[in-house]
Image: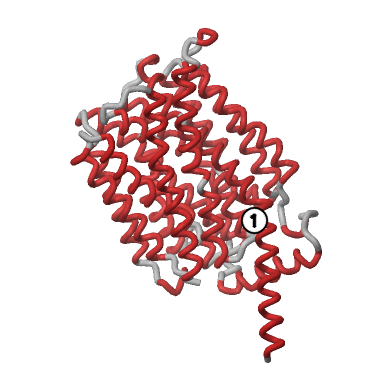
Amino acid sequence: MEATLQAGATASTYEDQVYRKVSWRLVPFLMLCFLIAYLDRINVGFAKLQMSQDLGFSETVYGLGAGIFFIGYFLFEVPSNLMLHKFGAKVWIGRIMVTWGVLSACFAFVETPTAFYTLRFLLGLAEAGFTPGIVYYLTTWYPSHRRAKIMAIYCMGSPLSGIIGNPLSGLLLSGMAGVGGWAGWQWMFLIEAVPAVLLGFFCFYYLDSSISKAKWLSDDEKRVLEKAKAEDVKGADAHVSVGKVFTDRRVWLISLICFCYVSGQYGITLWLPTFIKSTGVGDPLTIGLLSAIPYMAAIVAMYFFGRSADKHRERRWHLIIPCLMGAVGFLALPWIMHSTALSLVFLSIAAAGILTCSPLFWSLPSAFLSGAALATAVAMSNAIGNLAGFTSGYLVGYLRDVTQSSNSAYYFIATMLVLGAFAIWTIPAKLVNR
């Protein structure tokens, strides 16, 4: 009996060591890719501080352009993830990054609203499939009880892009203005696009499309990973066809949840510099430094909630609480906008809650689906969810134009987050807690 226990403990320890090796190989690189992806997606929020004035764009024009990205994203999301499933991560993720890097650089040449809308739409097409592709890719390596913490670390690329990218964007806006006859926002788009292209080409060399093709793993290590993966999918439905995913009520429910928290996510990422500016801060570099603070709070929250969710194998309340944190943060803002310091406190609470939702959310579809059906469900829920990037981006701009205030936008975002928390509460615990 004792020998059996020792053998079990040894096997468990060896499995932990193998997963540590996998994590050090994959997660830092994927997190870096996500950081660059998010920077190229949201740096338009900083460009707005100069570009709107230079080109005569209204709040509504900016909001529509910021949001139309997600229409292209929506249209190509599911096809993109199915192609990743077919061709493998190293080819498809690399293709995505190179394409969006080139398109992001083209924003330096925008002169009209039409050009702005067109490039944002094409950028959405190019980037479609990146996040759900990475999510699906990680499910092929990690069992469900290890995923929340790994997804939390990967998704830290989002707040890190704010911590690093926002001050960098602010510095480029002020420091590069007038160099070579270009505005600061033009240099910002060009310079920040370069890492995406370089990392995209590196993906072709660095990533492996499956465990079996990883030359940096021994045969014993591959067996351990394949065994853990096989045991994990026993609780998932591997026989759901791709077509049935689109009529699965569970998938539509998690798509609604994704839509709700993404409404808050892009309320933060696309408009944070503008929100801080409205408290009375004018210097772009100062705005960049201050806007890094909410993202720092988000990193702490993401790690804490992700680790706790894996430890307790509980998913619902670990998602509900962050949603409600985001709602509280936004509901408080109309009452304290006179104070930059207080605004940063509640923006930090909002960012910590909202950005924590993403890594925890992706444990839901993998709890009841696998294979191509999982790839489709992840892409579908992310596609529908990211339509909130369009509605949130456009409505925040429209409401600011109509009311000449951000208050109604704050209330809209808070309402969506409360709705998301309620939708999460309706999911049966036995479906996702494992």
Which percent across, then down, holds residue 430? Answer: 44, 74
Q: Residue at x 58, y 56 (%)?
A: 375
Q: Secondary structure at mark 1?
A: helix
- Of the pair 3 and 188, the residue shown nearer to us: 3
Q: Residue at x 52, y 11 (%)?
A: 179
Q: Residue at x 35, y 60 (%)?
A: 320
Which percent across, then down, holds residue 237? Answer: 56, 70
336 to 134, vertically: above or below? above
**Quadrant location of residue 272?**
top left
Colour theme: secondary structure
Give amino acid for label 1. Answer: Ser
Which percent across, then down, holds residue 283? Answer: 36, 22
Question: How many C-alpha atoms fall within 10 Å of the one at disc 1: few (<14), some, or many (≥20)?
Answer: some
88 to 175, vertically: above or below? below
Which percent across, then down, holds residue 56? Answer: 35, 16
- Of the pair 122 and 210, the residue shown nearer to us: 210
- Of the pair 428 and 322, the residue shown nearer to us: 322
Give the residue at mark 1.
23
